[in-house]
Every structure is written in structure tokens, then in C-alpha cells.
């Protein structure tokens, strides 16, 4: 991959001082904002709630989220998953669900 030369003589993947890339900077800002904790908005998020996919930074924020929203924190096993997001983990989850249904039936 060819690298571009920046005005100061250093090489890099792209010139960070280039005014022609405002969309790139805007996307980086939006990505950074999405990575913040959705409860306190102060720390970067580390965790994702399996129930509602809300991003949190700590146990305290996770508990606050559950208290505020009434979320159980459990993933909806019957939720539709698009084919492009279907992976081995989803396959195993579906298989186990079918096994549980069969055990209840017997």
C-alpha cells in the first residue's frame, strides 16, 4: 500500500491536516461518541447489555441502566437475526433452544 507524504515530511496513511476530509473527521467523532457509556456519558464503554445492547462502562452504570429501563439484561433468544450476522455462536444458541424445547415436549 502506498503511503502519502504529509506536508511536514512524515509519511502516513492519510494526511490529518487535509481540509478535504471533513466527512472522515465527522465519522471519527460519531464513532467516538458511540463508544462512550450511554448511562454516564463520561467514560468509554466496556460492556454491552445482552438484552438491549446498551453500552456501559462499569457495573454501577450497568445496574443503573437496568434500574432506569427495567431491562433484565438477558438476550432475547427468539429475536430475528439477519443472515449476514448469523454466525457459529447463533447456530449453537438456536440448537440449544431446540434441544430445550424437545426436552420439555418429552
Image: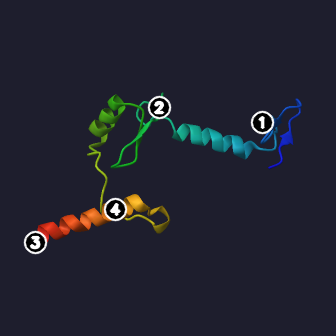
Choose mark 1 or mark 4, whichever is in front: 4
Answer whether labels 1 and 4 touch (C-beta < 8 Å).
no
Q: Give the percent coordinates (x, y) of residue 27.
A: 65, 44
9 relative position to 31: left or right: right
Neighbor class of circle 3 (other Cα within 10 Å; few <14, some 14-19, many 20+) is few
Among the two numbered marks 1 and 4 on one chain, the one whose residue lies closer to the N terminus = 1
69 to the left or right of 41: left
- The earlier-in-sequence mark between 1 and 2 is 1
Residue under circle 4?
92
The image shows residue 95 at horizontal and vertical percentages of 30, 66
Give the x, y percent position of residue 34: 52, 41
Q: In which quadrant will I find the C terminus?
A: bottom left
Q: CA distance from mark 4 to mark 3?
A: 21 Å
Q: Residue at x 83, y 36 (%)?
A: 11
Disc 1 residue crowd, few under 14, some 14–19, many 20+, Cα 10 Å = few
Point out the tag, 1 or 3, that comes first from the N-terminus.
1
The reply to whether residue 71 is visible in this rendering is: yes
Check if mark 1's residue and mark 2's residue have beta carbons within 8 Å. no
Q: Which mark is residue 16?
A: 1
Q: Which residue is mark 2?
A: 41
- Contact (Cβ within 8 Å) of mark 1 with mark 3: no
Q: Rounded to the nearest whole Å, what is the CA distance between mark 1 and mark 4?
A: 44 Å
Give me the residue at 49% from left, 32% from top. 44
Q: Earlier in the sequence, mark 4 or mark 2?
A: 2
Mark nearer the N terminus (3 vs 2): 2
Amino acid at each position: 500500500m502506498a503511503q502519502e507524504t504529509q506536508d511536514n515530511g512524515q509519511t502516513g496513511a492519510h494526511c490529518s491536516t487535509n481540509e478535504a476530509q471533513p466527512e472522515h473527521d465527522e465519522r471519527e467523532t460519531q464513532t467516538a461518541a458511540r463508544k462512550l457509556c450511554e448511562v454516564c456519558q463520561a467514560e468509554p464503554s466496556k460492556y454491552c447489555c445482552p438484552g438491549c445492547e446498551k453500552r456501559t462502562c462499569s457495573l454501577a452504570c450497568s445496574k443503573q441502566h437496568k434500574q432506569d429501563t427495567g431491562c433484565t439484561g438477558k438476550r432475547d433468544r427468539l429475536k430475528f437475526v439477519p443472515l449476514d450476522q448469523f454466525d457459529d455462536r447463533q447456530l449453537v444458541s438456536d440448537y440449544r433452544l431446540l434441544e430445550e424445547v424437545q426436552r420439555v415436549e418429552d
